[in-house]
């Protein structure tokens, strides 16, 4: 049974990964995500279905467009591989008949495009972040959820107010924007999913990852900093580990 589910999730994940790649390309360019059908970003030629098979097409074509031979960025392959892996990880953590599987699958599926769009363009599209707020609240209403609706609502309100205050204070003090509106909506949405107790850990872990990355890889220290990228990793790891399990471990320590 488990093997069949894992195979099905692998296929579904690769297909969803392929769609996430469309979001990563089109959302920052303000293009429609439905029309036109898949096309090469360089020559604009339509990509027929038989050349649009997740993972397999990328490998067969050697990561290049069949027509103009322009390189297809490696993140396309990476997304089609990590999406199924995350779904399988969530299945092994929660099982398929658990509302938490669906809740955290949706959260992680939104975090993947946010990770890449913020890393490449330093923006977090509102189309991805804002819907997380009602979605988190809706999941909180379903029996068997790990975060109650009051917790979800209070977490979203407190995180939102706190971040707006922080952004305002930072702007007053430094005369520049430190925290973007994108980060505020994103963290408010995540708070609606995780509840109040998880949020300090998710944010601290994201900040820690960000600081390590900044110190090691960023040469120009004055350059902007895509915090959403690290929030996305932190959120995926917290979801995979299980918000409740993670909290109980943290409390043990
Ligand atoms: Zn092309």
Image (spheres, rainbow, N blue to C red):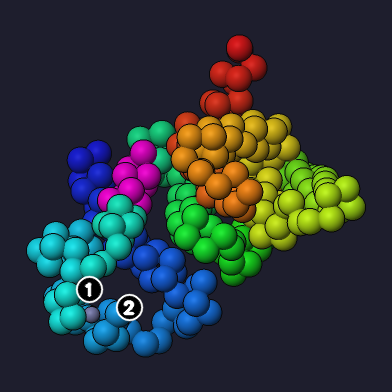
> How crowded is the residue under tag 2: few (<14 C-alpha within 10 Å), some, or many (20+)?
some
Residue 210 visible, this orientation: yes
Residue 111's tag is none
Answer yes or no: disc 1 within 8 Å of ligand 1.
yes
Q: Secondary structure at mark 2?
A: loop
Q: Main secondary structure of the magenta part?
A: helix
**Could you tell which of marks 2 and 1 lies nearer the N-terminus?**
2
Q: Which residue is mark 1?
A: 70
Q: Which residue is mark 2?
A: 41
Q: How many marks?
A: 2
* x, y percent for residue 204: 64, 32
When asked about the image quadrant of residue 205, the answer is: top right
> How crowded is the residue under tag 1: few (<14 C-alpha within 10 Å), some, or many (20+)?
some
* x, y percent for residue 115: 49, 53
Please give the name of the residue rendered at 32% of the width and 78% of the height, measured from the top-left corner: 41
Q: Is residue 251 left or right of residue 64?
A: right
Answer yes or no: disc 2 within 8 Å of ligand 1.
yes
Please give the name of the residue rendered at 40% of the width and 64% of the height, measured from the top-left corner: 20
Please give the name of the residue rendered at 60% of the width and 20% of the height, measured from the top-left corner: 250
Residue 82: say if magenta.
yes
Magenta region, residue range: 80-89
Location of the C terminus (image quadrant): top right
Closest to the observer, 149 or 121: 121
Please give the name of the residue rendered at 69% of the width and 33% of the height, measured from the top-left corner: 200
Q: In the image, is residue 65 above or below residue 242? A: below
Closest to the observer, 141 or 251: 251
Which image quadrant shows ligand 1? bottom left
Q: Secondary structure at mark 1?
A: loop
- Whole-angstrom CA distance, mark 2 to mark 1, is 9 Å
Q: In the image, is residue 67 above or below residue 166? A: below
Is there a contact, CB below 8 Å, between mark 2 and mark 1? yes
């Amino acid at each position: 049974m488990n093997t069949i589910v894992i195979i099905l999730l692998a296929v579904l994940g690769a297909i969803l990964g392929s769609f996430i790649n469309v979001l990563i390309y089109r959302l920052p360019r303000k293009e429609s995500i439905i029309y036109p059908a898949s096309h090469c970003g360089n020559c604009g030629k339509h990509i027929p279905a038989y050349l649009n098979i997740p993972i397999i097409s990328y490998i067969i074509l050697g990561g290049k467009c069949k027509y103009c031979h322009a390189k297809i960025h490696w993140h396309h392959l990476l997304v089609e591989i990590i999406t199924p892996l995350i779904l399988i990880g969530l299945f092994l953590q929660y099982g398929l008949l658990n509302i938490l599987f669906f809740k955290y699958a949706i959260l992680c599926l939104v975090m993947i495009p946010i990770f890449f769009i913020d890393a490449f363009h330093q923006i977090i599209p509102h189309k991805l972040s804002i819907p997380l707020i009602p979605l988190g609240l809706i999941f909180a209403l379903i029996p068997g959820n790990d975060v109650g609706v009051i917790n979800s609502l209070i977490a979203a309100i407190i995180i939102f107010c706190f971040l707006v205050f922080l952004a305002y204070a930072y702007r007053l003090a430094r005369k520049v924007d430190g925290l973007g509106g994108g980060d505020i909506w994103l963290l408010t949405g995540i708070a609606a999913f995780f509840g109040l107790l998880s949020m300090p850990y998710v944010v601290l872990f994201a900040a820690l990852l960000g600081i390590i990355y900044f110190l090691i890889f960023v040469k120009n220290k004055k350059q902007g900093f895509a915090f959403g990228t690290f929030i996305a990793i932190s959120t995926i790891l917290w979801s995979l580990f299980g918000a409740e399990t993670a909290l109980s471990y943290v409390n043990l320590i």
